[in-house]
Amino acid sequence: MNHAVKTYNTKSFKESFLNPNPEVSKFFDRSDHDFFCLRIEDIVAHAKIPIPPSREEGHTLILVLEGHYDLRIGSQEYRVREGELVIQQAGSIFR
């Protein structure tokens, strides 16, 4: 079974995978086209888990300041550790 992987922009990703509430909205109170920084731990609590494989129209940078962050880009699984940075290219499949 071959399913197409959907591409999201910031607005459509937020609407699809984050619960609507004022606390989440404050993180996105600028234009959807602006550069912005978010703490993953502030967003994860509001996410509709699991998020299926997706593509993002914009680039994503993930800097881990403490602990670790597990993710999959394409078919590769990564564990990003403290002090490491991941740059996820726009259009790449992630989850």
Image (cartoon, helix red, strand yellow):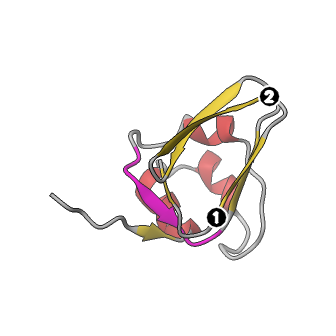
Name the residue that disc number 2 marks. Answer: 82
Q: Position of residue 44 (x, y in %)?
A: 57, 38
Q: Earlier in the sequence, mark 1 or mark 2?
A: 2
> Residue extending furthest front?
76
Q: Estimate the spatial distance between the alpha carbons at disc 1 and disc 2, rounded to whole Å.
A: 21 Å
Q: Amino acid at mark 2?
A: Glu
> Can you tell which mark lies on residue 76?
none
Residue under the point 58% across and 67% down: 10
- Tell me if residue 33 is in the magenta stretch: no
Pointers 1 and 2 in contact (C-beta within 8 Å): no
Residue under the point 57% across and 72% down: 57
**91 relative position to 36: left or right:** left
Q: Position of residue 43 (x, y in %)?
A: 61, 42
Q: Amino acid at mark 1?
A: Gln
Residue under the point 53% across and 63% down: 92
**90 relative position to 52: left or right:** right
> Residue extending furthest top?
67
- Tell me if residue 55 is in the magenta stretch: yes
Given residues 71 and 10, the one toward you in this image is 71
Viewport quadrant of the N terminus = bottom left
Name the residue that disc number 1 marks. Answer: 89
The boundaries of the magenta stretch are 51-58
Instruction: Examine the rendered structure and indicate whether residue 57 appears above or below residue 5.
Output: below
Q: Image quadrant of residue 2?
A: bottom left
